[in-house]
Image (tube, coloured by chain):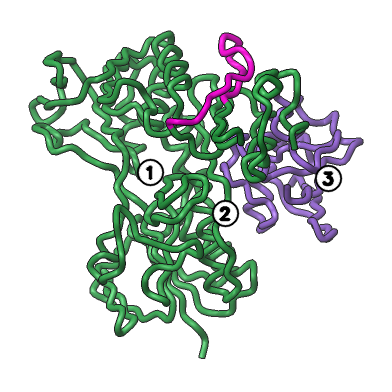
Protein backbone atom coordinates (compact mmCIF):
# COMPACT_ATOMS: atom_id res chain seq x y z
CA UNK A 1 0.00 0.00 0.00
CA UNK A 2 1.36 3.37 -1.02
CA UNK A 3 2.16 5.74 1.84
CA UNK A 4 2.25 9.47 2.40
CA UNK A 5 4.46 10.89 5.16
CA UNK A 6 2.82 13.95 6.66
CA UNK A 7 4.34 16.66 8.87
CA UNK A 8 1.78 18.81 10.68
CA UNK A 9 2.13 22.48 11.57
CA UNK A 10 3.31 21.49 15.03
CA UNK A 11 5.99 19.27 13.53
CA UNK A 12 4.42 15.89 14.25
CA UNK A 13 5.30 13.34 11.62
CA UNK A 14 3.04 10.43 10.73
CA UNK A 15 2.51 8.01 7.90
CA UNK A 16 -0.83 7.38 6.25
CA UNK A 17 -1.98 5.02 3.56
CA UNK A 18 -2.84 6.83 0.35
CA UNK A 19 -5.87 5.92 -1.69
CA UNK A 20 -4.90 5.85 -5.37
CA UNK A 21 -7.33 7.86 -7.48
CA UNK A 22 -8.00 10.32 -4.67
CA UNK A 23 -6.34 13.67 -4.22
CA UNK A 24 -3.72 14.16 -1.51
CA UNK A 25 -6.14 16.67 0.09
CA UNK A 26 -8.88 14.04 0.34
CA UNK A 27 -6.44 11.57 1.85
CA UNK A 28 -5.20 14.06 4.45
CA UNK A 29 -8.75 15.16 5.30
CA UNK A 30 -10.01 11.59 5.58
CA UNK A 31 -7.10 10.73 7.85
CA UNK A 32 -8.12 13.40 10.33
CA UNK A 33 -5.62 16.17 9.58
CA UNK A 34 -7.95 19.00 10.46
CA UNK A 35 -5.29 21.61 9.69
CA UNK A 36 -6.38 20.96 6.09
CA UNK A 37 -9.55 23.06 5.90
CA UNK A 38 -10.15 22.48 2.18
CA UNK A 39 -13.10 24.84 2.29
CA UNK A 40 -13.76 24.72 -1.45
CA UNK A 41 -13.79 20.94 -1.45
CA UNK A 42 -10.96 20.54 -3.91
CA UNK A 43 -11.93 22.91 -6.70
CA UNK A 44 -8.75 25.01 -6.55
CA UNK A 45 -10.59 28.04 -5.20
CA UNK A 46 -9.39 28.72 -1.65
CA UNK A 47 -5.77 27.64 -0.98
CA UNK A 48 -6.68 26.17 2.42
CA UNK A 49 -5.09 22.79 1.54
CA UNK A 50 -1.64 24.28 0.96
CA UNK A 51 1.26 21.88 1.55
CA UNK A 52 5.00 21.84 0.94
CA UNK A 53 6.23 18.83 -0.96
CA UNK A 54 9.79 17.71 -0.25
CA UNK A 55 11.96 19.44 -2.82
CA UNK A 56 13.61 16.26 -4.02
CA UNK A 57 10.18 14.79 -4.79
CA UNK A 58 8.70 17.67 -6.76
CA UNK A 59 9.66 16.12 -10.07
CA UNK A 60 7.54 13.05 -9.26
CA UNK A 61 4.40 15.19 -9.47
CA UNK A 62 2.47 16.22 -12.53
CA UNK A 63 3.05 19.87 -13.44
CA UNK A 64 1.10 22.57 -11.66
CA UNK A 65 -1.77 24.15 -13.62
CA UNK A 66 -1.76 27.90 -14.18
CA UNK A 67 -4.77 28.25 -11.86
CA UNK A 68 -3.03 26.38 -9.07
CA UNK A 69 0.18 28.38 -9.45
CA UNK A 70 -1.71 31.69 -9.55
CA UNK A 71 -3.58 30.85 -6.36
CA UNK A 72 -0.85 29.23 -4.28
CA UNK A 73 1.78 31.78 -5.29
CA UNK A 74 -0.38 34.56 -3.88
CA UNK A 75 -0.50 33.04 -0.40
CA UNK A 76 1.61 34.53 2.40
CA UNK A 77 3.62 31.36 2.90
CA UNK A 78 4.40 30.47 -0.69
CA UNK A 79 7.65 28.64 -1.40
CA UNK A 80 8.98 26.97 -4.54
CA UNK A 81 7.80 23.62 -3.11
CA UNK A 82 4.26 24.87 -2.47
CA UNK A 83 1.36 22.85 -3.85
CA UNK A 84 -2.35 22.73 -3.29
CA UNK A 85 -2.91 19.19 -2.10
CA UNK A 86 -6.33 19.05 -3.81
CA UNK A 87 -4.53 19.32 -7.13
CA UNK A 88 -2.21 16.35 -6.57
CA UNK A 89 -3.79 13.10 -7.69
CA UNK A 90 -2.36 10.30 -5.61
CA UNK A 91 -1.20 7.07 -7.23
CA UNK A 92 0.99 4.08 -6.34
CA UNK A 93 3.80 5.87 -8.15
CA UNK A 94 3.77 8.51 -5.41
CA UNK A 95 4.48 5.99 -2.63
CA UNK A 96 6.59 7.67 0.05
CA UNK A 97 5.46 11.21 -0.82
CA UNK A 98 6.48 13.61 1.96
CA UNK A 99 4.32 16.66 2.57
CA UNK A 100 4.29 19.35 5.26
CA UNK A 101 1.11 21.26 5.98
CA UNK A 102 1.80 24.96 5.31
CA UNK A 103 0.94 27.64 7.89
CA UNK A 104 -2.53 29.15 7.75
CA UNK A 105 -2.70 32.18 5.48
CA UNK B 1 -23.17 17.93 34.59
CA UNK B 2 -22.01 17.63 31.00
CA UNK B 3 -23.56 20.19 28.70
CA UNK B 4 -25.59 18.82 25.82
CA UNK B 5 -25.52 20.69 22.55
CA UNK B 6 -27.85 19.87 19.71
CA UNK B 7 -27.26 21.04 16.16
CA UNK B 8 -30.29 21.02 13.90
CA UNK B 9 -29.06 20.54 10.37
CA UNK B 10 -26.32 18.25 9.05
CA UNK B 11 -24.90 20.40 6.28
CA UNK B 12 -21.72 22.39 5.96
CA UNK B 13 -22.57 24.76 8.84
CA UNK B 14 -23.84 22.06 11.20
CA UNK B 15 -20.74 19.97 10.71
CA UNK B 16 -18.43 22.97 11.14
CA UNK B 17 -19.97 23.89 14.50
CA UNK B 18 -19.30 20.36 15.75
CA UNK B 19 -15.83 20.13 14.21
CA UNK B 20 -14.67 23.47 15.62
CA UNK B 21 -16.03 22.65 19.08
CA UNK B 22 -14.09 19.38 19.17
CA UNK B 23 -10.99 21.06 17.74
CA UNK B 24 -11.18 23.46 20.69
CA UNK B 25 -11.67 20.63 23.18
CA UNK B 26 -15.34 21.19 23.93
CA UNK B 27 -16.25 18.50 26.43
CA UNK B 28 -20.04 18.60 26.14
CA UNK B 29 -22.16 16.09 24.30
CA UNK B 30 -22.87 16.93 20.68
CA UNK B 31 -25.84 15.62 18.74
CA UNK B 32 -26.36 16.63 15.11
CA UNK B 33 -29.80 16.00 13.61
CA UNK B 34 -30.30 16.14 9.85
CA UNK B 35 -33.39 15.47 7.79
CA UNK B 36 -31.45 14.18 4.80
CA UNK B 37 -30.46 10.52 4.69
CA UNK B 38 -26.75 11.35 4.49
CA UNK B 39 -23.97 12.54 6.73
CA UNK B 40 -22.81 16.07 5.74
CA UNK B 41 -21.73 16.31 2.10
CA UNK B 42 -20.46 18.91 -0.35
CA UNK B 43 -23.22 20.63 -2.28
CA UNK B 44 -21.13 22.76 -4.70
CA UNK B 45 -20.17 19.84 -6.98
CA UNK B 46 -23.84 18.88 -7.40
CA UNK B 47 -24.28 21.52 -10.10
CA UNK B 48 -20.82 20.95 -11.59
CA UNK B 49 -18.64 17.83 -11.52
CA UNK B 50 -21.30 15.52 -10.14
CA UNK B 51 -23.71 16.30 -13.01
CA UNK B 52 -20.94 15.67 -15.51
CA UNK B 53 -20.19 12.32 -13.89
CA UNK B 54 -16.72 13.45 -12.80
CA UNK B 55 -17.32 13.34 -9.03
CA UNK B 56 -19.08 10.23 -7.74
CA UNK B 57 -21.43 10.47 -4.74
CA UNK B 58 -19.00 8.69 -2.39
CA UNK B 59 -16.47 11.49 -2.88
CA UNK B 60 -18.90 14.18 -1.74
CA UNK B 61 -18.71 13.33 1.97
CA UNK B 62 -17.28 16.22 3.98
CA UNK B 63 -15.81 13.81 6.52
CA UNK B 64 -15.46 10.03 6.65
CA UNK B 65 -17.89 8.20 8.94
CA UNK B 66 -15.02 7.44 11.36
CA UNK B 67 -14.63 11.16 12.05
CA UNK B 68 -17.97 11.34 13.86
CA UNK B 69 -17.07 8.37 16.06
CA UNK B 70 -13.57 9.62 16.80
CA UNK B 71 -14.86 13.06 17.74
CA UNK B 72 -17.89 11.80 19.68
CA UNK B 73 -20.33 13.63 17.44
CA UNK B 74 -23.62 11.74 17.54
CA UNK B 75 -25.60 11.95 14.34
CA UNK B 76 -29.24 11.33 13.61
CA UNK B 77 -29.89 11.36 9.87
CA UNK B 78 -33.17 11.11 7.98
CA UNK B 79 -34.98 12.65 10.95
CA UNK B 80 -36.49 16.13 11.09
CA UNK B 81 -36.99 18.28 14.13
CA UNK B 82 -40.65 19.24 14.16
CA UNK B 83 -40.85 21.52 17.19
CA UNK B 84 -38.63 23.48 19.55
CA UNK B 85 -39.96 23.94 23.07
CA UNK B 86 -37.70 26.71 24.34
CA UNK B 87 -39.14 26.74 27.86
CA UNK B 88 -38.41 23.05 28.43
CA UNK B 89 -35.37 23.10 26.12
CA UNK B 90 -36.83 20.13 24.38
CA UNK B 91 -37.11 19.11 20.74
CA UNK B 92 -39.74 16.94 19.16
CA UNK B 93 -38.61 14.86 16.20
CA UNK B 94 -40.41 13.44 13.17
CA UNK B 95 -40.00 9.92 14.54
CA UNK B 96 -42.00 11.06 17.62
CA UNK B 97 -38.98 10.87 19.90
CA UNK B 98 -37.81 13.82 22.00
CA UNK B 99 -34.42 15.29 22.84
CA UNK B 100 -33.46 17.83 25.45
CA UNK B 101 -30.64 20.35 25.07
CA UNK B 102 -28.74 22.92 27.07
CA UNK B 103 -27.63 24.77 23.96
CA UNK B 104 -29.02 24.63 20.45
CA UNK B 105 -27.68 25.59 17.03
CA UNK B 106 -29.95 26.16 14.06
CA UNK B 107 -28.05 25.19 10.94
CA UNK B 108 -31.20 24.40 9.04
CA UNK B 109 -30.02 25.79 5.72
CA UNK B 110 -32.33 26.74 2.93
CA UNK B 111 -34.54 25.06 0.38
CA UNK B 112 -35.05 25.71 -3.30
CA UNK B 113 -37.66 28.30 -4.10
CA UNK B 114 -40.40 26.89 -6.25
CA UNK B 115 -43.10 28.32 -8.49
CA UNK B 116 -46.84 28.06 -8.21
CA UNK B 117 -47.54 27.46 -11.89
CA UNK B 118 -49.51 24.79 -13.76
CA UNK B 119 -47.45 21.64 -14.36
CA UNK B 120 -44.85 22.27 -11.67
CA UNK B 121 -45.51 18.79 -10.25
CA UNK B 122 -44.86 16.91 -13.50
CA UNK B 123 -42.09 14.34 -13.63
CA UNK B 124 -38.92 15.84 -15.08
CA UNK B 125 -39.43 19.19 -13.34
CA UNK B 126 -36.65 19.51 -10.80
CA UNK B 127 -35.02 21.79 -8.29
CA UNK B 128 -31.37 21.29 -7.44
CA UNK B 129 -30.55 21.28 -3.77
CA UNK B 130 -29.89 17.75 -2.56
CA UNK B 131 -27.88 14.80 -3.74
CA UNK B 132 -31.15 13.11 -4.72
CA UNK B 133 -32.15 16.13 -6.82
CA UNK B 134 -28.79 16.08 -8.57
CA UNK B 135 -28.92 12.32 -9.15
CA UNK B 136 -32.37 12.66 -10.72
CA UNK B 137 -31.14 15.47 -12.98
CA UNK B 138 -27.99 13.56 -13.94
CA UNK B 139 -30.18 10.58 -14.82
CA UNK B 140 -32.36 12.66 -17.11
CA UNK B 141 -29.53 14.45 -18.93
CA UNK B 142 -28.97 12.31 -22.01
CA UNK B 143 -27.22 13.64 -25.12
CA UNK B 144 -29.63 15.20 -27.58
CA UNK B 145 -32.28 15.89 -24.95
CA UNK B 146 -33.78 19.32 -24.40
CA UNK B 147 -33.34 21.07 -21.10
CA UNK B 148 -35.10 24.26 -20.05
CA UNK B 149 -33.66 26.10 -17.05
CA UNK B 150 -35.67 28.74 -15.24
CA UNK B 151 -33.28 31.13 -13.53
CA UNK B 152 -29.92 32.60 -14.52
CA UNK B 153 -28.22 32.51 -11.14
CA UNK B 154 -25.25 30.30 -10.26
CA UNK B 155 -27.26 27.07 -10.17
CA UNK B 156 -28.90 27.73 -13.53
CA UNK B 157 -25.67 28.78 -15.23
CA UNK B 158 -23.58 25.96 -13.79
CA UNK B 159 -26.17 23.39 -14.81
CA UNK B 160 -26.32 24.97 -18.28
CA UNK B 161 -22.53 24.64 -18.60
CA UNK B 162 -22.53 21.03 -17.38
CA UNK B 163 -25.42 20.13 -19.66
CA UNK B 164 -23.77 21.67 -22.73
CA UNK B 165 -20.65 19.62 -22.08
CA UNK B 166 -22.91 16.55 -22.15
CA UNK B 167 -24.40 17.53 -25.50
CA UNK B 168 -27.76 18.66 -24.17
CA UNK B 169 -29.83 21.31 -25.92
CA UNK B 170 -30.21 24.12 -23.32
CA UNK B 171 -32.57 27.09 -23.11
CA UNK B 172 -32.18 29.35 -20.09
CA UNK B 173 -34.94 31.75 -19.04
CA UNK B 174 -34.09 34.72 -16.83
CA UNK B 175 -36.79 37.03 -15.61
CA UNK B 176 -34.40 39.97 -15.05
CA UNK B 177 -32.62 41.84 -17.81
CA UNK B 178 -29.32 40.08 -17.11
CA UNK B 179 -28.04 36.86 -15.53
CA UNK B 180 -26.52 36.81 -12.01
CA UNK B 181 -28.29 40.09 -11.39
CA UNK B 182 -28.26 39.77 -7.61
CA UNK B 183 -24.57 39.03 -7.09
CA UNK B 184 -22.59 40.25 -10.09
CA UNK B 185 -21.74 43.54 -11.75
CA UNK B 186 -23.37 44.20 -15.15
CA UNK B 187 -19.95 43.71 -16.83
CA UNK B 188 -19.75 40.23 -15.44
CA UNK B 189 -23.31 39.35 -16.41
CA UNK B 190 -22.61 40.43 -19.95
CA UNK B 191 -19.38 38.43 -20.11
CA UNK B 192 -21.13 35.26 -18.93
CA UNK B 193 -24.12 35.79 -21.20
CA UNK B 194 -21.79 35.99 -24.20
CA UNK B 195 -19.90 32.93 -23.07
CA UNK B 196 -23.03 30.83 -22.65
CA UNK B 197 -24.41 32.03 -25.98
CA UNK B 198 -21.16 31.07 -27.72
CA UNK B 199 -21.39 27.64 -26.07
CA UNK B 200 -24.82 27.23 -27.62
CA UNK B 201 -27.10 28.10 -24.72
CA UNK B 202 -30.26 29.93 -25.84
CA UNK B 203 -30.50 32.65 -23.17
CA UNK B 204 -33.79 34.51 -23.01
CA UNK B 205 -33.70 37.55 -20.74
CA UNK B 206 -36.77 39.31 -19.35
CA UNK B 207 -38.52 35.98 -19.71
CA UNK B 208 -40.18 33.85 -17.04
CA UNK B 209 -41.81 30.47 -17.08
CA UNK B 210 -45.62 30.60 -17.21
CA UNK B 211 -46.67 26.96 -17.29
CA UNK B 212 -45.48 23.45 -18.03
CA UNK B 213 -47.43 20.80 -19.92
CA UNK B 214 -47.10 17.08 -20.45
CA UNK B 215 -48.81 13.75 -19.90
CA UNK B 216 -47.35 12.75 -16.54
CA UNK B 217 -43.93 14.01 -17.63
CA UNK B 218 -42.89 17.42 -18.91
CA UNK B 219 -43.19 17.82 -22.68
CA UNK B 220 -43.54 21.57 -23.22
CA UNK B 221 -42.78 24.83 -21.42
CA UNK B 222 -44.74 28.02 -21.99
CA UNK B 223 -42.79 31.23 -21.40
CA UNK B 224 -44.12 34.53 -20.07
CA UNK B 225 -43.72 36.08 -23.55
CA UNK B 226 -46.01 33.46 -25.08
CA UNK B 227 -43.22 31.36 -26.66
CA UNK B 228 -43.37 27.62 -26.16
CA UNK B 229 -40.42 25.24 -25.94
CA UNK B 230 -40.23 21.47 -26.23
CA UNK B 231 -38.53 20.10 -23.13
CA UNK B 232 -37.50 16.76 -21.66
CA UNK B 233 -36.33 18.22 -18.36
CA UNK B 234 -37.01 21.52 -16.60
CA UNK B 235 -34.85 22.87 -13.81
CA UNK B 236 -36.19 25.54 -11.53
CA UNK B 237 -33.17 27.49 -10.25
CA UNK B 238 -34.72 30.67 -8.92
CA UNK B 239 -33.01 30.96 -5.56
CA UNK B 240 -33.57 29.57 -2.10
CA UNK B 241 -35.62 30.40 0.94
CA UNK B 242 -34.28 30.01 4.47
CA UNK B 243 -35.57 27.16 6.62
CA UNK B 244 -36.88 29.27 9.48
CA UNK B 245 -40.26 27.72 10.28
CA UNK B 246 -38.98 25.92 13.38
CA UNK B 247 -37.49 29.15 14.72
CA UNK B 248 -40.55 31.16 13.85
CA UNK B 249 -42.91 28.69 15.49
CA UNK B 250 -40.73 28.78 18.59
CA UNK B 251 -41.10 32.57 18.75
CA UNK B 252 -37.52 33.48 17.78
CA UNK B 253 -36.97 36.71 15.89
CA UNK B 254 -36.99 36.02 12.15
CA UNK B 255 -37.12 38.13 9.02
CA UNK B 256 -36.23 36.25 5.84
CA UNK B 257 -33.87 34.22 7.99
CA UNK B 258 -33.28 33.64 11.67
CA UNK B 259 -31.99 36.91 13.08
CA UNK B 260 -28.60 36.68 14.76
CA UNK B 261 -26.07 39.17 16.05
CA UNK B 262 -22.40 39.27 15.05
CA UNK B 263 -21.76 36.40 17.48
CA UNK B 264 -24.30 34.11 15.76
CA UNK B 265 -26.62 34.44 18.78
CA UNK B 266 -30.37 34.47 18.20
CA UNK B 267 -32.92 36.26 20.36
CA UNK B 268 -32.79 33.26 22.76
CA UNK B 269 -29.55 33.18 24.83
CA UNK B 270 -29.34 29.39 24.51
CA UNK B 271 -29.85 29.26 20.74
CA UNK B 272 -27.41 30.11 17.93
CA UNK B 273 -27.86 30.06 14.17
CA UNK B 274 -25.39 29.86 11.29
CA UNK B 275 -25.23 29.40 7.54
CA UNK B 276 -27.87 29.92 4.87
CA UNK B 277 -30.67 30.24 7.45
CA UNK B 278 -29.13 33.12 9.44
CA UNK B 279 -29.59 36.82 8.73
CA UNK B 280 -26.67 38.61 10.31
CA UNK B 281 -25.00 42.04 10.47
CA UNK B 282 -22.28 42.19 7.84
CA UNK B 283 -19.94 45.15 7.46
CA UNK B 284 -19.23 44.31 3.81
CA UNK B 285 -22.91 44.67 3.08
CA UNK B 286 -23.50 47.55 5.45
CA UNK B 287 -26.47 46.00 7.20
CA UNK B 288 -28.25 42.72 7.81
CA UNK B 289 -27.76 40.09 5.14
CA UNK B 290 -28.25 36.41 4.56
CA UNK B 291 -25.48 34.71 2.58
CA UNK B 292 -25.86 31.43 0.78
CA UNK B 293 -22.32 30.18 0.47
CA UNK B 294 -19.85 27.63 1.76
CA UNK B 295 -17.64 30.39 3.16
CA UNK B 296 -20.47 31.84 5.20
CA UNK B 297 -21.58 28.43 6.43
CA UNK B 298 -18.06 27.59 7.57
CA UNK B 299 -17.06 30.92 9.10
CA UNK B 300 -20.37 31.69 10.78
CA UNK B 301 -20.44 28.17 12.19
CA UNK B 302 -16.99 28.78 13.68
CA UNK B 303 -18.32 32.02 15.14
CA UNK B 304 -21.25 30.12 16.73
CA UNK B 305 -18.82 27.55 18.12
CA UNK B 306 -16.66 30.24 19.75
CA UNK B 307 -19.76 31.76 21.34
CA UNK B 308 -20.76 28.35 22.70
CA UNK B 309 -17.25 27.92 24.11
CA UNK B 310 -17.59 31.22 25.96
CA UNK B 311 -14.84 32.87 23.90
CA UNK B 312 -16.97 34.92 21.50
CA UNK B 313 -15.38 36.42 18.40
CA UNK B 314 -17.37 38.69 16.10
CA UNK B 315 -18.07 37.47 12.57
CA UNK B 316 -15.95 39.71 10.36
CA UNK B 317 -14.87 37.44 7.52
CA UNK B 318 -14.91 38.77 3.98
CA UNK B 319 -17.61 36.91 2.04
CA UNK B 320 -16.36 34.92 -0.93
CA UNK B 321 -17.84 32.65 -3.55
CA UNK B 322 -16.76 30.68 -6.56
CA UNK B 323 -18.33 29.28 -9.68
CA UNK B 324 -16.91 27.04 -12.39
CA UNK B 325 -18.53 27.23 -15.82
CA UNK B 326 -16.89 25.70 -18.91
CA UNK B 327 -13.20 26.62 -18.61
CA UNK B 328 -14.05 29.79 -16.68
CA UNK B 329 -13.15 30.01 -13.03
CA UNK B 330 -15.04 32.82 -11.36
CA UNK B 331 -14.09 33.91 -7.85
CA UNK B 332 -15.82 36.71 -6.01
CA UNK B 333 -14.79 38.33 -2.73
CA UNK B 334 -16.71 41.09 -0.97
CA UNK B 335 -20.24 42.17 -1.77
CA UNK B 336 -20.79 44.29 -4.83
CA UNK B 337 -23.18 47.27 -4.63
CA UNK B 338 -24.84 49.07 -7.48
CA UNK B 339 -23.18 52.41 -6.78
CA UNK B 340 -19.65 50.98 -6.70
CA UNK B 341 -17.11 52.21 -9.23
CA UNK B 342 -16.06 49.22 -11.35
CA UNK B 343 -12.52 49.00 -12.74
CA UNK B 344 -11.63 46.44 -15.37
CA UNK B 345 -8.20 44.95 -14.70
CA UNK B 346 -6.96 43.08 -17.75
CA UNK B 347 -8.61 42.39 -21.07
CA UNK B 348 -11.85 40.35 -20.95
CA UNK B 349 -11.10 39.16 -24.50
CA UNK B 350 -8.17 37.16 -23.07
CA UNK B 351 -10.59 35.39 -20.68
CA UNK B 352 -8.26 36.28 -17.80
CA UNK B 353 -9.17 39.48 -15.96
CA UNK B 354 -10.58 40.96 -12.78
CA UNK B 355 -13.26 43.49 -11.96
CA UNK B 356 -12.50 45.69 -8.98
CA UNK B 357 -15.37 47.42 -7.18
CA UNK B 358 -14.37 50.58 -5.38
CA UNK B 359 -16.56 52.23 -2.78
CA UNK B 360 -15.40 55.69 -1.71
CA UNK B 361 -12.03 54.84 -3.23
CA UNK B 362 -11.56 51.66 -1.18
CA UNK B 363 -11.66 48.17 -2.60
CA UNK B 364 -15.04 46.68 -1.60
CA UNK B 365 -15.31 43.66 -3.88
CA UNK B 366 -13.55 41.78 -6.64
CA UNK B 367 -14.51 39.29 -9.30
CA UNK B 368 -11.70 37.35 -10.91
CA UNK B 369 -12.12 35.32 -14.08
CA UNK B 370 -9.35 32.76 -14.62
CA UNK B 371 -7.21 35.19 -12.63
CA UNK B 372 -6.64 33.56 -9.27
CA UNK B 373 -3.49 35.55 -8.53
CA UNK B 374 -5.67 38.57 -7.72
CA UNK B 375 -8.05 36.75 -5.42
CA UNK B 376 -6.26 36.34 -2.08
CA UNK B 377 -4.49 39.73 -2.21
CA UNK B 378 -7.84 41.38 -3.00
CA UNK B 379 -9.47 39.68 -0.02
CA UNK B 380 -6.77 41.17 2.21
CA UNK B 381 -7.13 44.59 0.61
CA UNK B 382 -10.89 44.49 1.19
CA UNK B 383 -10.39 43.51 4.82
CA UNK B 384 -7.90 46.35 5.25
CA UNK B 385 -10.24 48.87 3.61
CA UNK B 386 -7.36 49.82 1.32
CA UNK B 387 -7.82 52.72 -1.09
CA UNK B 388 -6.52 52.04 -4.59
CA UNK B 389 -5.27 54.37 -7.26
CA UNK B 390 -7.57 53.56 -10.16
CA UNK B 391 -4.93 53.88 -12.88
CA UNK B 392 -2.46 51.63 -11.10
CA UNK B 393 -5.13 49.12 -10.06
CA UNK B 394 -6.33 48.74 -13.63
CA UNK B 395 -2.84 47.74 -14.80
CA UNK B 396 -2.60 43.93 -14.57
CA UNK B 397 1.21 44.17 -14.76
CA UNK B 398 1.22 45.59 -11.22
CA UNK B 399 0.46 42.73 -8.79
CA UNK B 400 -2.39 43.53 -6.42
CA UNK B 401 -0.28 42.50 -3.46
CA UNK B 402 1.94 45.52 -4.02
CA UNK B 403 -0.99 47.63 -2.77
CA UNK B 404 -0.98 45.84 0.59
The hue in which chain A appears in the rendered picture of the protein: purple
- Residue B259 image position (x, y, % from top left): 37, 61
Q: Residue B65 at x, y = what percent? A: 53, 59
Q: Residue furthest front?
A: B360
Query: Which residue in the protein does label 1 denote?
Result: B131
- Specify which label sits upstream in the sequence, 2 or 1: 1
Instruction: Measure how far apart labels 2 and 3 are at the Cα level.
Output: 35 Å
Picture quadrant where residue A11 is located: bottom right
Magenta residue check for A72: no
Distance of label 2 from label 1 (alpha carbons): 31 Å
Label 1 – label 3 distance at C-alpha: 35 Å
Q: Which residue is mark 2?
A: B316
Disc 2 on helix, strand or loop?
A: loop
What's drawn in magenta, residue-wise? B338-355
The answer to whether residue A89 is seen in the rendering is: no
Which residue carries the number 3 mark? Answer: A98
The chain holding disc 2 is B
Relative to B386, residue B205 above or below: above
Is residue A74 or residue B316 the one in the foreground? B316
Q: Nearer the viewer, residue B58 or B233?
A: B233
Badge 2: residue crowd in 10 Å (few <14, some 14–19, many ≥20): some
Q: Which chain is green?
A: B
Q: Residue at x 27, y 74 (%)?
A: B92
* Residue at 80% from the left image edge and 56% from the top image edge: A9
Q: Secondary structure at mark 1?
A: helix
**Residue under mark 1: which chain is it in?**
B
Amino acid sequence: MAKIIVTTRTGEISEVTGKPGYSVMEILRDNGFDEIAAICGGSCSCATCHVYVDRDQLDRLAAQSEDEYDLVSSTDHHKPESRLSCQIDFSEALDGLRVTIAPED
Amino acid sequence: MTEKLIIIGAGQAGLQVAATLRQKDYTGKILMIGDEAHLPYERPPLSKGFLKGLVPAERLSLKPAAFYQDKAIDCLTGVAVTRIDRRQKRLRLSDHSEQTYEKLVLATGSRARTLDIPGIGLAGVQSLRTLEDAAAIAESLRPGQRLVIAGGGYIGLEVAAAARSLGIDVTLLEIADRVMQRTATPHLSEFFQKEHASQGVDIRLNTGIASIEGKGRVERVFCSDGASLAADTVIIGIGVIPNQTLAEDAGLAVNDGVLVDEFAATSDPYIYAAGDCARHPNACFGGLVRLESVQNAVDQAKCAAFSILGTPQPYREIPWFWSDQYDLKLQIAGLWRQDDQVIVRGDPATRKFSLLCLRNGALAAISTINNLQDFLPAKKLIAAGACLDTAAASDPAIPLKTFL
